[in-house]
Amino acid sequence: MKLEKRDLVIRPRRLRRTDVLRRLVRETHLHTDDFIAPVFISAGENKKNSIPSMPGVYQWSIDRVNEEIDELLAAGIDKIILFGIPAEKDSTGSDSYSSNGIIQQSLKKLKQEYPDLFIITDVCFCEYTDHGHCGVIENKDVHNDSTLSLLGQQALSHVEAGADMVAPSGMMDGMVGEIRFALDSGGFDHIPIMSYAVKYGSAFYGPFRDAVESTPQFGDRKSYQMDPANIREALKEVELDILEGADIIMVKPALAYLDVISHVKDISNLPVACYNVSGEYSMLKAAAEKGWIDHDSAMMEMLLSMKRAGADIIITYFAKEAAQLIKIKK
């Protein structure tokens, strides 16, 4: 039968018909190189403490953290970000910038035993202060400028101990510039800064606060973390951090802020990272445990959405599991 031109139908389904065709035209791909795995280090010995609100994630003592590093490397993950839980906390989080602090000890050990492991350190105070806030308290609020010099000290001490990159997360105005100055003055102008440029005051951080024991002892963090309603403010924060010398910029959380990741990608020529945070991780784990959702499929779809939105780098507690799936598919 002869077809008239008006009878022709556009058929996008032609390219979805087989797995080979779908892979041929796939626009977005996940790679193990995209992932950074968070690792929690706790003071003490012989510790592998489970975190009830984060199944499969642990607090490790320095003498046992090799178990986690070995598994990550076997899966193809060679980049980690360290968080520390010190033996003692105080009002200024002094362990965070002590040459013998929990992170500094961890760095010295790991860089000696795993010289090719790329180690990023979180630069903040909430894990180290007895009040659980991200800086020096004055008049029941974090005082921005009093906190800045301590952030510089902390970052410098991390790099002196072996950190390959620092990641300031406290949302203090001027934090990137302060850290850049401290590192450059200390002879570390080659060390990059991955700034938590856009960190929202999110309800998705709850399990993380269990992991690092950092729940604020009073108030909340809304005076320094961003209002979830705002996006123009996020772009302003990105522009400021770029001017101050950031090398990578981050959006946190990820899943509920895919639009923000996309907008940031549009205005920046720097690599864009996102943090697939604890609440996003734990929700999927809980739903999968109930049998309400297919864990692996949902995990990969979640991570793919972040990459599709524009993230070049994904910090995720799923790093090991996702990497193992990617290896199997290859």
Image (cartoon, helix red, strand yellow):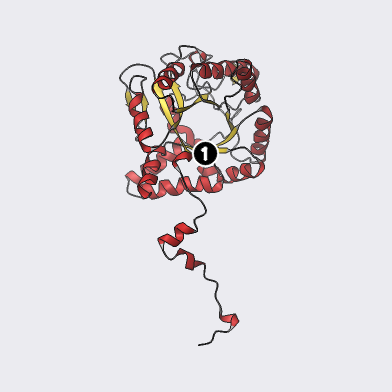
In the rendered image, the vertical position of residue 284 relative to residue 86, given as above or below: below
Front residue (pair 281, 217): 281
Q: Quadrant of residue 319?
A: top left
In the rendered image, the vertical position of residue 74 relative to residue 191, given as above or below: below
Q: Position of residue 120 (x, y in %)?
A: 49, 27
Residue drawn 50% across and 43% down?
Answer: 255
Residue under pointer 1: 313
Front residue (pair 209, 171): 171
Q: Position of residue 162 (x, y in %)?
A: 49, 20
Query: In the image, 52: left or right of 270?
Result: left
Asked if residue 44 shows in the view, the reply is yes
Q: Position of residue 142 (x, y in %)?
A: 59, 20
Under circle 1, the secondary element is strand
> Given the current orientation, which residue lies at the most extreme front position?
116
In the rendered image, the vertical position of residue 227 relative to residue 181, given as above or below: below
> Given the current orientation, which residue lies at the most extreme bottom position?
1
Q: Quadrant of residue 87?
A: top left
Q: Position of residue 63 (x, y in %)?
A: 34, 19
In the rendered image, the vertical position of residue 54 relative to residue 181, given as above or below: below
Front residue (pair 126, 267): 267
Residue drawn 69% across and 30% down?
Answer: 243
Front residue (pair 213, 124): 124
Type of residue at label 1?
Ile
Asked if residue 53 shows in the view, the reply is no
Query: In the image, 287: left or right of 132?
Result: left
Residue drawn 55% across and 47% down?
Answer: 309
